[in-house]
Image: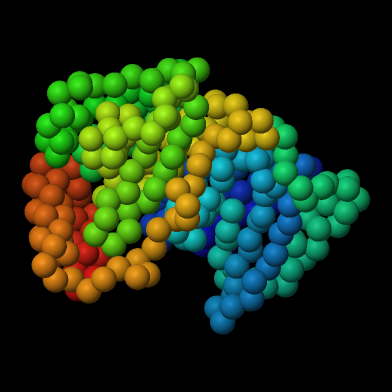
Amino acid sequence: MRDGTWTFDGETVRLVPSRDRHVHKLRQLVGERAVPLTAVAGIAYEPGRKGGRLRLRLREGSDPFTQAAHGRIPDAGDPYQLSIDAGRTGVAEYFVDEVRNALLIEQVPEGPSDRYLLPGPSVPLTASAGDGSATFDGESVHLTWNWATEAGKRSAGAQRFAVKDLAGVDWTPSAGLENGHVRFRLKGVMNGPPPKHDPSCLLLWGTEKETRTVAMLLAAVVARLPHPSGVPELEVADAVPSDEGVPGLGGDDTDGLLRRLRELGELHRDGVLTDEEFTTAKQSLLRRL
């Protein structure tokens, strides 16, 4: 398959993404995944006009990447999906039957797992965001700020949070003209200030590169926090925001759009965004007019 290859030996489903340029970069960052049968909740082949798609469903709590990224990344970046070429549908259906038969024989439960059955991403990792960046070395998260940081937040200086001191991580993606954020919640600390002013938060602007690096870093952090069967690791802020319901631009909305465009332009000039990323982000904003 141009999208990658999946193999099954009776015990492990091995997923290898293609290095082809059409394959989403997040899938390539995640790389090869060896999924033990005990982590699988189900598998399906979804037929389509040009072949279809294989979709592997994991047991809740079995994979730190899914725990961190669920509902926050595009389908194209999901490492547990595989596009099927036309003419290969018979092979895909056979693959599904083999995995399903093994699940029945081994009596693998579909319910939640009480421990992670797959590892998190390798460290160190760095994620760039709207007003700063985060680096994770496996033991602590280090936040540093850039030119776009609010003055009070910048005056607090760089922050470092040991994993042992974290109660969890919140990830709210950007929606419409509203910034998203990542908040590293500390044990014993209740509601903090708004993300723009909170030195334990990074603002998110919603670029493709930002999303994939944040997904990888948070998956690595989540893998080292207490398992969700005991203490929740990552909270969803009510629901993952979407563009639905964003009002028509006018007044403050127009000002917000112009501000975001200026911010993107400055990131592009500073070399933080590539030409392709800048064009994609700018077009995404303009489509909301």
**Can I make out residue 16 in this image?**
yes
State the residue lying farthest toward the bottom: 49
Relative depth, front residue between 258 and 107: 258
Query: Based on the displayed image, in which of its 4 quarters is residue 153 positioned?
Result: top left
- Above or below: residue 177 compared with residue 189: below
Query: Based on the displayed image, in which of its 4 quarters is residue 177 positioned?
Result: bottom left
Name the residue: 29% across, 39% down: 195
Q: Position of residue 283 (x, y in %)?
A: 21, 66
Name the residue: 60% across, 67% down: 53
Q: Position of residue 64 (x, y in %)?
A: 57, 38
- Above or below: residue 211 compared with residue 175: above
Q: Is residue 25 left or right of residue 2?
A: left
Name the residue: 18% across, 71% down: 249
Q: Position of residue 73 (x, y in %)?
A: 45, 54
Relative depth, front residue between 247 and 257: 247
**Can I make out residue 129 in this image?**
no
